[in-house]
Image: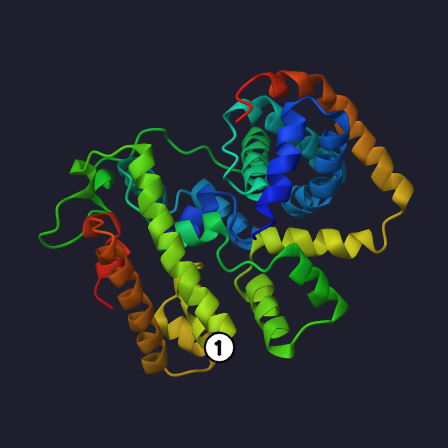
Amino acid sequence: MPFHSSDLEAYLDESLPVQEMARIEKALRENEPNLARQLAAIHARRNAGVHSLGEIWRRHRLSCPTREQLGSYLLGAMAEDFARYIAFHVETVGCRYCQANLADLQLQQTEAEQAVQVRRKRYFQSSAGHLQAGGDANPG
Amino acid sequence: MPTPPNADALLIRRIREGDADAWTDLIGRFEGRLLAYIDRRVRNRTEAEDLVQETFIGFLTSLPNFDGARPLEGYLFSIAAHKLTDYLRREGRRPTLPLMSHKNSENDWEPAGNARPASSIARGDERRQMEEAALVTAICRQIDHCRRHGQWERLECVELLFLPGRTNQDVAAQLKISEQAVANYKFEFLAKLRTAVRSQDLPEEIFPELYREM
């Protein structure tokens, strides 16, 4: 099946559904005709400043539900038609960002608090040294 | 996914001032979703946690250049995407693409017909952002309209057409509606976007999809 340019744009931005990402990578490794050329054309278009609807829609996440709405969706506490739309957006469209938020919200209900704290402490300790440097410049 | 901009702006201001508690808050708020995003692709929890760590470091080092008007979550996801891409290249899973465009590929996206090639239009980042913002506003208006009026089929239709870029035929099959209905939704959606673009005197050639034959 050929690749649509919208899929390839999402591939370049690491926002395509995981299984589709793998399909494109496999095709690239197998030197599928025209694929590298299609990707190069997208680069060229971007460099020229020509806009793509899908790219803008994805970048600004224009139809993504809020995290609060995703939480309500998980709890089954929202209108049926909106819940159906969220399922469509997450499963059919395959929004990676909403999938990640949903997975996180689901895990929060089951993951041991201690494991979370250990992880967060590690992130803090490894990054806090950069905190002041970030605070010095461009306070606006 | 919109988040309250004021809350994010306040958090960023505190982090810029070197507030460790604010940094802890940011990590607590975002690490789970970043980990889920990366882990789904990497399929290795330890490696995924390392990449989240790199994402947070990357965020702090890029903070002086962070545009406060940009959604914080989107910015963090974009850093995570870069870290993920680098990792997958190192692992040999994501083939490296040539930096230079393929011969002749520069013209592949050029609009057909008499439209002026967009590559001939010199414009700065500010101008591009303004064009993008105009389209964002126009798309948002239509999404909001669909949601407020319960037009879910219409919304799902245009989302499938422009996000995964499905054909009319595929969308019709997916939504179990006629191809004519898909074409009608598409026509109305693009017509409204064209009106929005014209009302702001933006050049047609920078939005080729809006003027492509359906």
Number of numbered discs: 1
Seen at 57% across and 71% down, the residue is A85
Q: Quadrant of residue B31 in the image?
A: top right
Disc 1 residue crowd, few under 14, some 14–19, many 20+, Cα 10 Å:
few
Color style of the picture? rainbow
Q: Which quadrant is home to the N terminus of chain A? A: bottom left
**Which residue is disc 1 drawn over?**
B149
Seen at 69% across and 67% down, the residue is A73
- Three-letter amino acid code at the position of disc 1: His
A124 lies left or right of B155: right
Q: Nearer the viewer, residue B7 or A49?
A: B7
Q: Position of residue B18 (x, y in %)?
A: 69, 21
Q: Position of residue B161 (x, y in %)?
A: 39, 65
Chain at numbered mark 1: B
Element assignment for label 1: loop
Seen at 85% across and 37% down, the residue is A117
Seen at 57% across and 28% down, the residue is B90
